[in-house]
């Protein structure tokens, strides 16, 4: 068959190269009709088959059978009928051979077609396989890229997750602090409210108390005023009695002696010194405020006068309470200079 | 009817006037020492022995007789500053002023911080910080005493000043001119001689001493620089002269110059040149003393009956008698800032120091004698020193005028005499 196939091949090729089957009247320079191409194999195949049949027939005749002339020459005179029969037999043989050959060709053609079909299928399979491989490679690459993408995406996701978790932790912490602060504020506010309530209550109580006190004071003041009036009148009377009896002079002498015994300026009393001092006396005869109404000495002189007065405090008690005065004036020297 | 009307008017006014003041007239003061407390200063330097500043301050103040320091053993607390004090406690202890302080820094150069507190006024009168040293710690203490004294009395303190006096050894073998602190401590011999030394006199700046030395066989005035000991005779002609007294400006000296057995007052310029004769009298004129303004010279003269004090203008002129009480008033020394004069007054054979008022010529005798001599005022005029010839022995008497207290300084041996109180030095 290979030899046959090669032969066909050669035939096909010669057909292609030579004038071949061309449309009558077609431009010989024009390329073969494009429509011929896809079916070149089958057309080529049938042409080759036709050629083959023709050639093969001739060849067989030449090799297997003697040429007709020879027959005629070499034959003995033969009956026409016999000849006609022979010829008929030969025609029948011929026909059978042709049919056989046609069947053979038919078979070969079928084989070729089969072959072609197989090849086509193989090619298709190959192509499909190749395509599948390509597909597989593509898929693999895509899968790898996808895997890489996924990995990266996962990492990013993880990172994002971590950050999110950190953020969440921070927010939670901040929230907790806010809550804590809010609680503290609440507590404080509550304490303040409590305190305010307490203070308000106290203020209210105090206000009540103050009102009571004011009323009480007013009442007492009225009473005291009356009592004071009476007391003053009586005091004036007793005071006058004390002055007349010399009690006041005795009292003043005791004060003078007390002050004098405590007045000890180092170096004695400076010449020309003069001072007048007004004292505020507290009940209990304690000296409160010392005011110089007149003074002509030094700072040291002033200090010893003040010291004398402070040392003398509390001053002698008056012989009768009516002689007590809230203020007292001390003066030195006994007579004004120049008098 | 008219009288009765007035009577009722007075009665009506009385309740008003009765609520005025009680008038009390003060006639005198009482002399007494001021009760104070000098609290031992806290010593914040760890090394070495502390110098007891407070002890010296207390001794200085106590010596004047004007202060009665509270004993340390009776102090309940020992505060170091005003803020630590409970004033009522000190009032109960009858203390009027308290000095507190503390010492810090190094033992070599301690810093003393102190505060004087008025217990009755309840305030700090003085807050001070002084830098001291190992060598100057006594001087620092005297300075503190000066400040306290001035604050409490109004008069400047005299504890930082120096004294000059003559010490005569037993048997008169040696005469020494000595300079010492006002409390008699730290005596330094500035001149020794086998011949008599007399009449030391401080220059107004305290740098020089003029005195009389008999080293040439007769009385002669020398001027000696205290710090270096350098000395020179006042008069180039080496004439006999005695009783030198400095003029207030320190430019000249009045001396009693003895010419032809007659003593008169002359004025020598410190720079040399011929002396100016101030008195011209056959009587003995001696013991000159310049007035504070330098315009007059007081001196002793026996031109009358017995020695008396006279005064003459420093530029020359007629002398006038000043002292009249008794038959013997000599050696005048003017009290600084006061119209008073210290003199040696003799009566009934007793030589005593008296204080004469220059206005009314009244005389107050301060000492008993019988052999007191050479009064010399402290620069503040509140004390005077003199050669005290008491029956108990001879020394230097210091009389504190305000308190009337007298203290006696004595040497371990010999006689101390002719003291001169130096000027302020700071």
Image (spheres, grey):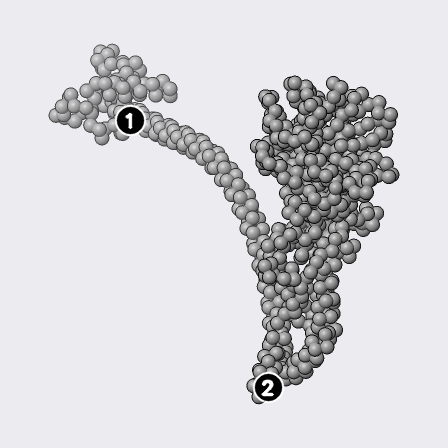
Position of B358 relative to A240 (above/below): above
What residue appears at the point 80 percent right and 32 percent down from the top-left corner?
B416
What residue appears at the point 74 percent right and 56 percent down from the top-left corner?
B30
Figure quadrant of the N terminus of chain B: bottom right
Nearest the camera: A300 or B298? B298
Do the residues indicated by labels 2 and 1 lie within the same chain of the protein?
A: no
Nearest the camera: B271 or B314? B314
Q: Within the image, what quadrant is residue B129 found in? A: top right
List the residue tagged with mark 1.
Answer: A41
What residue appears at the point 33 percent right and 28 percent down from the top-left corner?
A109
Element at badge 1?
helix
Q: Within the image, what quadrant is residue A90 found in? A: top left
How many neighbours does mark 1 have within 10 angstroms: few (below 14), some (14-19), or many (20 or more)?
A: some
Give left or right: position of B187 versus A146. Answer: right
Give left or right: position of B24 versus A139. Answer: right
Q: Position of residue B177 (x, y in %)?
A: 76, 26
Nearest the camera: B79 or A288? A288
Tell me the distance, in whole angstroms, between the alpha carbons under discs 2 and 1: 180 Å
Element at badge 2?
helix
What residue appears at the point 34 percent right and 18 percent down from the top-left corner?
A6
Give left or right: position of A79 versus B194. Answer: left
List the residue tagged with mark 2.
Answer: B4
Figure quadrant of the C terminus of chain B: top right
Q: Is residue A227 visible?
A: no
| Marks 2 & 1, CB-CB < 8 Å contact | no
């Amino acid at each position: 068959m290979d030899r046959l196939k090669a032969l066909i091949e050669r035939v096909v090729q010669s057909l292609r190269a030579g004038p071949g089957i061309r449309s009558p009247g077609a431009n010989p320079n024009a390329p073969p009709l494009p429509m011929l191409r896809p079916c070149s194999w089958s057309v080529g195949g049938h042409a080759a088959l036709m050629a083959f049949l023709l050639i093969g027939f001739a060849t067989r005749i030449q090799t297997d059978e003697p040429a007709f002339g020879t027959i005629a020459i070499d034959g003995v005179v033969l009956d026409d009928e016999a000849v006609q029969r022979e010829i008929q037999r030969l025609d029948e043989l011929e026909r059978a051979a042709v049919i056989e050959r046609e069947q053979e060709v038919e078979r070969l053609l079928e084989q070729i077609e089969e072959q072609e079909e197989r090849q086509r299928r193989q090619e298709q399979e190959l192509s499909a396989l190749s395509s599948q491989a390509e597909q597989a490679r593509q898929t693999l690459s895509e899968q790898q890229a996808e895997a890489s993408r996924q990995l990266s995406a996962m990492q990013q996701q993880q990172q994002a997750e971590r950050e999110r978790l950190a953020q969440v932790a921070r927010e939670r912490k901040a929230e907790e602090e806010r809550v804590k602060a809010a609680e503290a504020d609440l507590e404080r506010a509550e304490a303040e409210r409590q305190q305010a309530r307490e203070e308000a209550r106290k203020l209210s109580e105090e206000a009540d108390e103050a009102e009571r006190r004011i009323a009480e004071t007013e009442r007492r003041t009225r009473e005291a005023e009356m009592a004071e009036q009476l007391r003053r009148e009586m005091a004036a009377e007793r005071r006058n009695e004390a002055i007349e009896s010399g009690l006041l002079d005795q009292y003043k002498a005791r004060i003078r002696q007390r002050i004098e015994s405590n007045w000890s300026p180092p170096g004695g009393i400076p010449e020309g010194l003069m001072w007048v001092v007004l004292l505020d006396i507290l009940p209990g005869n304690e000296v409160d405020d010392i005011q110089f109404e007149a003074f002509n000495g030094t700072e040291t002189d002033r200090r010893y006068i003040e010291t004398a007065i402070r040392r003398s405090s509390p001053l002698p008690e008056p012989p009768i309470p009516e002689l007590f005065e809230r203020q007292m004036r001390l003066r030195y020297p006994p007579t004004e200079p120049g008098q | 009817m008219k009288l009765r009307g007035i009577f009722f008017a007075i009665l009506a006014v009385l309740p008003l006037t009765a609520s005025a003041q009680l008038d009390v007239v003060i006639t005198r003061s009482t002399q007494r020492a001021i009760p104070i407390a000098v609290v031992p200063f806290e010593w914040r330097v760890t090394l070495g022995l502390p110098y007891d500043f407070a002890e010296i301050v207390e001794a200085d103040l106590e010596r004047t007789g004007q202060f009665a320091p509270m004993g340390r053993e009776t102090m309940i607390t020992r505060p170091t500053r005003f803020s630590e004090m409970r004033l009522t406690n000190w009032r109960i202890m009858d203390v009027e002023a308290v000095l507190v302080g503390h010492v810090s820094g190094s033992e070599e150069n301690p810093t003393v911080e102190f505060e004087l507190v008025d217990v009755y006024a309840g305030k700090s009168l003085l807050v001070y910080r002084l830098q001291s040293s190992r060598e100057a710690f006594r001087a620092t203490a005297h300075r503190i005493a000066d400040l306290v004294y001035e604050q409490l009395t109004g008069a400047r303190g005299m504890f930082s000043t120096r004294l000059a006096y003559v010490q005569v050894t037993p048997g008169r073998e040696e005469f020494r001119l000595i300079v010492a602190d006002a409390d008699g401590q730290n005596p330094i011999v500035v001149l020794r001689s086998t011949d008599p030394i007399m009449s030391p006199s401080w220059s107004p700046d305290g740098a020089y001493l003029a005195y009389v030395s008999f080293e040439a066989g007769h009385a002669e005035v020398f001027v000696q620089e205290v710090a270096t000991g350098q000395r020179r005779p006042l008069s180039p002609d080496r004439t006999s002269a005695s009783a030198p007294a400095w003029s207030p400006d320190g430019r000249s000296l009045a001396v009693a110059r003895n010419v032809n057995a007659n003593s008169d007052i002359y004025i020598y310029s410190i720079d040399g040149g011929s002396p100016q004769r101030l008195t011209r009298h056959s009587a003995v004129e001696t013991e000159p003393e310049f007035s504070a303004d330098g315009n007059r010279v007081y001196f002793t003269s026996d031109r009358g009956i017995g020695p008396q004090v006279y005064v003459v203008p420093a530029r020359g002129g007629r002398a006038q008698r000043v002292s009249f009480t008794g038959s013997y008033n000599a050696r005048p020394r003017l009290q600084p800032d006061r119209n008073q004069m210290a003199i040696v007054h003799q009566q009934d054979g007793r030589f005593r120091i008296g204080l004469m008022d220059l206005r009314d010529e009244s005389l107050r005798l301060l000492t008993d004698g019988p052999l007191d001599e050479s009064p010399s005022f402290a620069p503040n005029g509140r004390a005077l020193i003199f050669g005290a010839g008491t029956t108990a022995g001879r020394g230097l008497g210091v009389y504190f005028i305000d308190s009337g207290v007298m203290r006696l300084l004595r040497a371990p041996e010999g006689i101390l005499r002719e003291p001169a109180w130096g000027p302020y030095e700071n």
